[in-house]
Image (cartoon, helix red, strand yellow):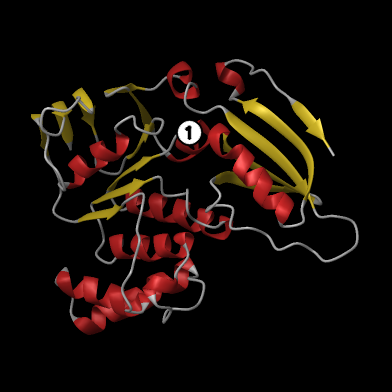
Amino acid sequence: MRLESVSKRYGRGRWILKDVHAEISPGEVVAFAGGNGSGKSTLLRMLVGITGPTGGRITGRPREVGYVPDRFSPNGRLSAVAYLTHMGRIRGMPTRTASARAHQLLDRLSLAGGKEARLHTLSKGNAQKVELAQALLVEPRLLVLDEPWSGLDASAHGVLAEIIAEVARSGGSVVFTDHRESVTTAHAARTYAVRTGRVALATADTVVAHRDETEIVLVRPDGGQVPHEPDWGALGALPVTRRGAEIVVRVSRERGDALLLSVLRSGWSVAGVTRGVRDRRAGEAVQERGTR
């Protein structure tokens, strides 16, 4: 799949993307990294054909495309499995085949509340699981994921990584967006940096500009009731690691204060906060360390 001199704007508004060149090969995982408002979501919508470019052209789009937008707000009263069965039928699957595939995918993604949970009752993370399942009903030759880890609970992070690897091994292309270098380097063969409408192959310097993060170390308080573990994905935390009795989470700089407030209200203790975390290859960041 190839993007040649692709530009996009709506009406006479500003250029959202300008003169984009990129190539995505079969079996390849490609990331587009950029901050909010950089144009990366618009780029993905053009890749899947929801909107067309104002200038330039996109060629080589395969027939079977799976797409997970950054926001999925289901408001229907269908159950998750009924919705997926319906979507499978729209895509040409026999009802029995679509239902079996829906059950298989929801089992794998461990949908909270069960497969019969009504769409309008789902949390952001569980709604995202349903939309991911929708994208996988028919084996995609192009799987496009917009900030796919942002809403998922930690238990689903590994499953998503497996799915991405499986699609690539089968010869499909995977494209995803994220602003964290720790994510793009872990899962993508190539990363394009998106900034102010321009797209270029990323270097450590271009990606790091978007990924100043806050690292928070949490511990359960001594004695008393054990606090409930939050939905880290919904809070924007990634990755989440466990280090003995501690939980270490990373979150974008702009969401750090909100996460801290949420975990403190939930009864967690904060052992430390490190602001300005960066990949060591791109230079050291100024750090502020706090303790309990």
**SS at badge 1:** helix
Res 188 → quadrant:
top left
Q: Position of residue 266 (x, y in %)?
A: 71, 57
Instruction: Kindly give the residue lying farthest to the right in the view shown.
Output: 223
Q: What amino acid does circle 1 point to?
A: Thr
Q: Position of residue 205 (x, y in %)?
A: 47, 16
| In the rendered image, the vertical position of residue 217 relative to residue 106, given as above or below | above
| In the rendered image, the vertical position of residue 174 relative to residue 56, given as above or below | below
| In the rendered image, the vertical position of residue 243 relative to residue 10, given as above or below | below
Q: Residue sitting at 16 percent across and 33 percent down?
A: 2
Q: Residue sitting at 36 percent across and 60 percent down?
A: 132
Q: Is residue 67 left or right of residue 115?
A: left
Q: Is residue 82 left or right of residue 203?
A: left
| In the rendered image, the vertical position of residue 100 relative to residue 175, given as above or below | below
Q: Is residue 22 left or right of residue 114?
A: left
Q: Position of residue 83 (x, y in %)?
A: 29, 75
Q: Quarter holding the N terminus? A: top left
Q: Is residue 39 left or right of residue 19?
A: right
- Identify residue for label 1: 185
Res 217 → quadrant:
top right
Q: Position of residue 180 (x, y in %)?
A: 49, 34
Q: Residue sitting at 29 percent across and 60 percent down?
A: 135
In this rendering, the count of numbered labels is 1
Q: Nearer the viewer, residue 246 or 141?
A: 246
Instruction: Kindly give the residue lying farthest to the bottom in the view shown.
Output: 96
Q: Quarter holding the C terminus? A: top right
Q: Residues within 10 Å of mark 1 (few under 14, many from 20)?
A: few
